């Protein structure tokens, strides 16, 4: 297992093969419909959230993680500022995503676990099974490209967007992997929000 997903009083294992396949499937969709675009990600910690984030990184997109409690107006402002073309959201935040869509009519929206999403995923699976190249078969992206945008907390002023390169994410993850002394086979529990730079980089360090 690569990840254990909490489900009530038990945990559901996700194997490395399943995780890689899901990343490859979502990356295929990104490359087909929004290649190289900025994609906003809205939702609480979940397996789907993590998979979409990784798919954005591998596919050459720029991922914009957002705090799950942001009001629709703030989300729309950040999407407009960064030029985001798509908003991927959890099912619980569908109403807020709909509000954002009203403010940004050209925005592409998609939710975890919807019938439309399931149909698109099925089409991606079919294309990959038919021999379409998967994202892991493509050349690695330039590490100096911006791969993630994060907004500051706004403690002293209005939140500002910061660009992070793939190289920066890798170095951050390698540093924490070395200093937190993770070892293969250990189980770790993630309580930090994945939209926070420390939470996502420590998760990549664990992986």
Image (cartoon, rainbow, N blue to C red):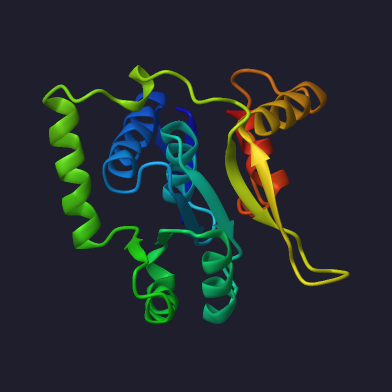
Taking the spot 45% from the left edge, 27% from the top edge, the residue there is 1
Q: Is residue 137 visible?
A: yes
Furthest toward the right, the residue is 156
Instruction: Tell which of 73 and 41 is nearer to you.
Output: 73
Quadrant of image for the C terminus: top right
Res 189 visible: no
In the figure, is residue 108 to the left or right of 204? left
The answer to whether residue 21 is left or right of residue 176 is left
| Residue 113 coordinates in the image, percent (x, y) | 29, 58
- Determine whether 132 is above or below 33 in the image: above
The location of residue 172, given as percent across then percent down, is 74, 32
Residue at image location 35% in from the left, 24% down from the top = 17
Residue appearing at x 44%, y 76% in the figure = 100
Q: Quadrant of residue 52?
A: top left
Vertical placement of 178 versus 4: above or below? above
In the displayed structure, 129 sits above or below 156; it is above
194 or 82, nearer to the observer? 82
- Number of dots carrying numbers: 0
Residue 136 spot, x, y in % from top left: 37, 21
| Residue 189 x %, y % | 64, 42
Q: Quadrant of residue 96?
A: bottom left
Q: Nearer the viewer, residue 207 or 168?
A: 168
At 42% from the left and 63% from the top, the residue drawn is: 90
């Amino acid at each position: 297992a690569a990840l254990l997903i909490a489900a009530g009083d038990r945990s559901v294992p996700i194997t490395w093969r399943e995780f890689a396949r899901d990343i490859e499937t979502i990356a295929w969709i990104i490359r087909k419909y929004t290649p190289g675009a900025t994609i906003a990600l809205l939702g609480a910690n979940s397996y789907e959230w993590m998979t979409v984030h990784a798919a954005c990184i591998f596919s050459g997109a720029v991922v914009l993680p957002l705090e799950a409690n942001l009001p629709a107006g703030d989300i729309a402002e950040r999407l407009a500022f960064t030029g985001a073309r798509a908003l991927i959201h959890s099912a619980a935040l569908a109403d807020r995503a709909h509000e954002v869509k009203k403010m940004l009519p050209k925005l592409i929206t998609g939710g975890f676990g919807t019938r439309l999403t399931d149909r698109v995923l099925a089409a991606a699976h079919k294309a990959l099974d038919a021999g379409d190249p998967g994202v892991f078969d493509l050349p690695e992206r330039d590490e100096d490209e911006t791969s993630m945008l994060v907004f500051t907390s706004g403690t002293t002023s209005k939140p500002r967007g910061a660009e992070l390169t793939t190289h920066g994410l890798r170095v951050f993850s390698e540093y924490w992997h070395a200093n937190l002394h993770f070892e293969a086979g250990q189980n770790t529990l993630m309580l930090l929000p994945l939209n926070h730079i420390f939470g996502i980089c420590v998760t990549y360090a664990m992986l």
